[in-house]
Amino acid sequence: MSQKLLMSMPNQPEKVAKSKRELSWQVASNLLVSFKYAWAGLSYALQTQRNFRIHLVIGASAIALGIFLHLRSIEVAVIGLTSGLVLALELLNTAIESVVDLIVKQSYHELAKIAKDCAAGAVLVSALTAVLVAGVLLLPPLLALIQSNLS
């Protein structure tokens, strides 16, 4: 709408904003539809993002190793939480990269590079933290198991 038309109808912008908000609720009309969209995002990441698959396998392996080594439930939960954080940040990284690529298309922009690099950096920080946590929790019982088998 033109600015002149909006000025002549003072309540019109509120109606436009309200109707857009009402339409936003129609995107995911119920919880089941929301889960469908979330599953579509996970499915996309699994199919297209190599690093997501790598993080998933490593995280699942760390959890399985923790169970095998009879770690306490809280320790396995901490490994699961840190692994889940890595996966969540990998999904956000994918989303940010997709939006940036949509905006800049095939051109280079320094701010696009910064956004993508920072998102990747967030994944790296979380992955290094997860490795540290898993190492602290898994290495002592793993080394004890290896040592007991050698004696």
Image (tube, rainbow, N blue to C red):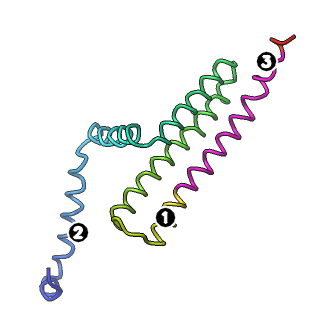
Query: Tag 3's secondary structure?
Result: helix
Q: Which image quarter: residue 8?
A: bottom left
The amino acid at mark 2 is Ala
Q: Which mark is residue 17?
A: 2
The amino acid at mark 1 is Ala
Q: Which mark is residue 36?
A: none
What residue does disc 1 label?
A: 115
Magenta part of the chain: 120-147
Query: Tag 2's secondary structure?
Result: helix
Q: In which quadrant will I find the C terminus?
A: top right
Residue furthest to the right in view is 151
Q: How far apart in space, not on screen, are marks 1 and 2 (Cα)? A: 29 Å
Label 2 or label 3, whichever comes before in sequence order: 2
Q: Does the CB distance between marks 1 and 3 fall below 8 Å?
A: no
Q: Position of residue 32 (x, y in %)?
A: 28, 36
Q: Answer with left or right where residue 55 lies relative to residue 95.
A: right
Residue drawn at (40%, 53%), measured in percent from left and top? Answer: 95
Q: Position of residue 6 (x, y in %)?
A: 16, 83
